[in-house]
Image (spheres, rainbow, N blue to C red):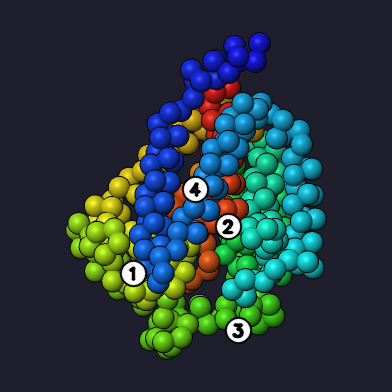
Amino acid sequence: MIISSLKARWRHYDYVLLASVLLLAVIGLAALYSISLGYDPVDFTNFRKQLIYFGFGLLIAFIASLLNYSAFRVYSRYFYWGAAILLVLVAIFGTTLRGTRGWFSLFGFYFQPVELAKVALLFFLAKFFSNRYQFFNEWRHVIVSLFGTLILAFFVLMQPDTGSAAVLLGLWFILLMVTGVRWRYLGVIMLTAIVLVSILWFGMFADYQKARIMTFLNPAIDPLGSGYNVTQAKIAVGSGGVFGRGLGFGSQSQLKFIPESQTDFIFAVIAEELGLLGVALVLGLWVLIFYRLARAAKRARDDFGQFVLLGILIIFFIHIFVNIGMNIGLLPVTGISLPFLSYGGSFVLVSMFFIGVAESVIASK
């Protein structure tokens, strides 16, 4: 019975979606390998760890694809409160890296509970919106969904991790737009957001977060300090030309002018070493992934599956938009990773889980 079900699912898998993800992962691994060559002595530790992460990620994606995605609807509340508890625990017992207390450390590996919060919020909102799809002309449904989002976003901001909090809020806002909510509601929400941002600026943002925003507005304010990352990333992106300098031959990445080149600024490394053609390949693959997810959402058998697929698309889109935006100086640096390309175990595992869930929805036609 299990084999029969497995064969049936394999017939409906979206292999184009899976192949696009795997090709992005290969490009990311190639960039990490190149970055490793620039260390003295050469250090392939991050490259090897990323291989392990993707190995486990593929296993997680495979298992998730075999599950009935409706189970995520049934257990969405447990995902939600479990994620909230982990966010509280990491604030108390977590490890601080790069100014953010958002990691659990175990045997040399680091795990970010905020990535599970993205999963939990996705299932929470997908269930909430699918249950009330026809009733979002009532304020109370908008407020309840916003309150559920703000609980998780608040704990994330306390770390502080502004970028991930923006992903959570962006997921809620864009999904809300999909429901066809009244425009005047959106206007009130946007005005409220402006007030909240003002409160955050004067009451919660740390000095380094304010510096990132001010640097975004004018990188020349502190070119050797808070503006250094953006300046060097822009130089790397601009120096790649059409064909790039070649893997292992990018001066910005190999000479370590780009801080956090394996995570936040891996796009700059790809642009410098693979050039415009490499960037076009990466963006083309993402356009294909978005198309396959949107196409599957239109064909989903129920509203929950549709909102899950759209939510996955939205989370990936926000990550890509913000990460590339900060690499080319159009958005503030917020520590947002580039899916399937940036180094980091937590987001790789969660991203592969998202792909597995997407395949589960697609195969359940």
Tell me the quarter of the picture where residue 178 sits: top right
Q: Label 4 near label 3: C-beta < 8 Å?
A: no
Q: Secondary structure at mark 4?
A: helix
The residue that mark 3 highlights is 207
Q: Which residue is mark 2?
A: 167
Dot 2 crowding, Cα within 10 Å, few <14, some 14–19, many 20+: many
Q: Amino acid at mark 3?
A: Asp
From the viewer's perspective, is 345 left or right of 124? left
N-terminal of the two: label 2 or label 4? 4
Q: CA distance from mark 2 to mark 4?
A: 26 Å
Q: CA distance from mark 3 to mark 1?
A: 30 Å
Q: Quadrant of the N terminus?
A: top right
Asked if the residue under mark 4 is in contact with the one under mark 2, i.e. CB atoms within 8 Å, the reply is no
- Three-letter amino acid code at the position of disc 4: Leu
Q: CA distance from mark 2 to mark 1?
A: 31 Å
Q: Amino acid at mark 2?
A: Val
Whole-percent x and y of residue 227?
A: 43, 81
Query: Does residue 84 appear left or right of residue 65 in this picture?
Result: right
Q: SS of the residue at dot 3?
A: helix
Q: Secondary structure at mark 1?
A: helix
* 172 to the left or right of 331: right
Q: Quadrant of the C terminus?
A: top right
Disc marking residue 210: none
Nearer to the camera, 255 or 77:
255
Q: State the residue lying farthest toward the left.
A: 242
Q: Which residue is mark 4?
A: 51
Q: CA distance from mark 4 to mark 1?
A: 21 Å
Residue pointed to by mark 1? 254
